[in-house]
Amino acid sequence: MQELLSPDIIVRFLIGFAVGALIGLERQKRMVQESTGGVRSFGLLSLFGTITAYTYTVTGNMIVLVYAVAVSTILIGVQITYKMFKTMRKGMTTSIVLAIAFMLGVLVGLDEPPVPGQLIGPLQVLAMTVAFLVFLVLGFKQEFQAVVAVISRDEMISAAELGVLILFFWPLVPETVQIGTVMLPAQQIYLLVILLLSISFVNYILVKKFGSRGPLVFGFFGGFANSEATVSSLAEFHVKTSRRFPGRIALSAILANVAMILRNGVIVVILDPTLQIFKYYTIPLAILVAGAVYRMARETKRSDEIEKGEIESALGSPFEFGAAIRFAVVFTAVSFLSLFLQSVYADAGIIAAALLGGFASAGAIVATVGIGFAGATIGLSTAVLAVIIATTTSVFNKVVYVYLSDRETDLVKLVARDSLIMAVGVVLFIIMLVIGVVPVV
């Protein structure tokens, strides 16, 4: 039996109150009557669940759980009855989240004692995560309603199609497929196709919601997830809007590249806390971001002067399976070739893999190299070159993905010019690294 008032017990009960109090905080902001539950009511109910569940784990007495469930059911039932028949107000949200608060408290109480050196167990982390998600859902009610308001019946059917694709086909896709001596990440490719379809849907909704600003918002935030898939989706969208706004789409591609560059920097810092790789990455990071800022300033002025008007989203299905399949084919071919080179040619293969793999997913290459450097299987100079080359290649590869979706020259020329302006300084820096003008020590 655990020691009474030991640190993990105190933390458990504090978390037990906090998960409910966080939900109650949002409810209290919407409080219209003193009788509406707030921080205290929700926090105490979740703490009640924690105390009950913890008592059960210590004593093994099932009666404690039965008593607690009965009491919480009565409390929630009274709240529902009072709201419906006394105040005559509609809605079941408060009653539902009351029940959730109690169950989150139970999760905290049922958690096993954490391993030595830790104060928080896995069920407590789960309870805190769910509490935060509930808080977001409640707190952004108007934003969610605004998004739902612009979604039509056909678009809801498209979203359901994506859900079916994920739920029914995901378990059937093997994690890897062996081709010769190369293990191809089949599940990763499948997930990237799903990601492309998902962000295509998000792009569609953002454009309907924000008009001309939609692609810009989508380009930046989509770039954090996968800049290649994001730009592919933007190019497809460009074709379906009659190619009337190439400047805005090109600007969105720039923002996707900026997000990708920043994301790779974060990956490097996480995998190499010593910052040995990152101190060299700062130079191309500054060059790429500076080039992007310059192009964004020029393109914004051009779009305001020439491409006036809102982008109309009179599209059919938000999901473009053709773009997803083309992306999957390119990613599969490049991934296979880069993995083969890495397995055969060691350090030289890693550089070649970075050069080719950057066309498919720079984030995957950067993560692989970072893990290898942390595990001392890849040297510092090789790691620095691979990270910078993969990131630079990922800036250039947008030309390929745009061309695959739209063979008209206007957008391709804009994206090619932007990529060249952003990356030319970094190419010179790579050359200096290779010939030893900038030593890697």
Image: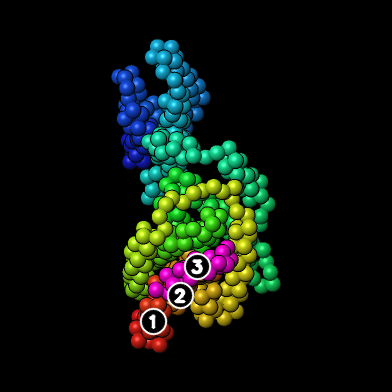
Which is more toward the observer, 309 or 254?
Answer: 309
* Front position among marks 1 and 3: 3
Query: Which one is earlier in the sequence, the residue at label 1 or at label 2?
Result: 2
Check if residue 317 falls in the magenta segment: no
**Residue found 35% across the figure and 66% down from its top:** 298
Query: Which one is earlier in the sequence, the residue at label 1 or at label 3?
Result: 3
Residues at marks 3 and 2, CA–CA distance in whole angstroms: 27 Å
Secondary structure predominantly adopted by residues drawn in magenta: helix
* Front position among marks 1 and 2: 1
**Image height of 172 relative to 412, above or below:** above
**Residue found 66% across the figure and 46% down from its top:** 168
Q: Image quadrant for the N terminus?
A: top left
> What residue is pinned by disc 2?
389
- Looking at the rendered structure, the kind of residue marked 3 is Asp
Which is more toward the observer, 115 or 395?
Answer: 395
Residues at marks 1 and 2, CA–CA distance in whole angstroms: 11 Å
Query: Which one is earlier in the sequence, the residue at label 3 or at label 2?
Result: 2
> What residue is pinned by disc 3?
410
**Residue found 44% across the figure and 15% down from its top:** 84
Q: Quadrant of residue 426?
A: bottom left
- Looking at the rendered structure, the kind of residue marked 2 is Ile
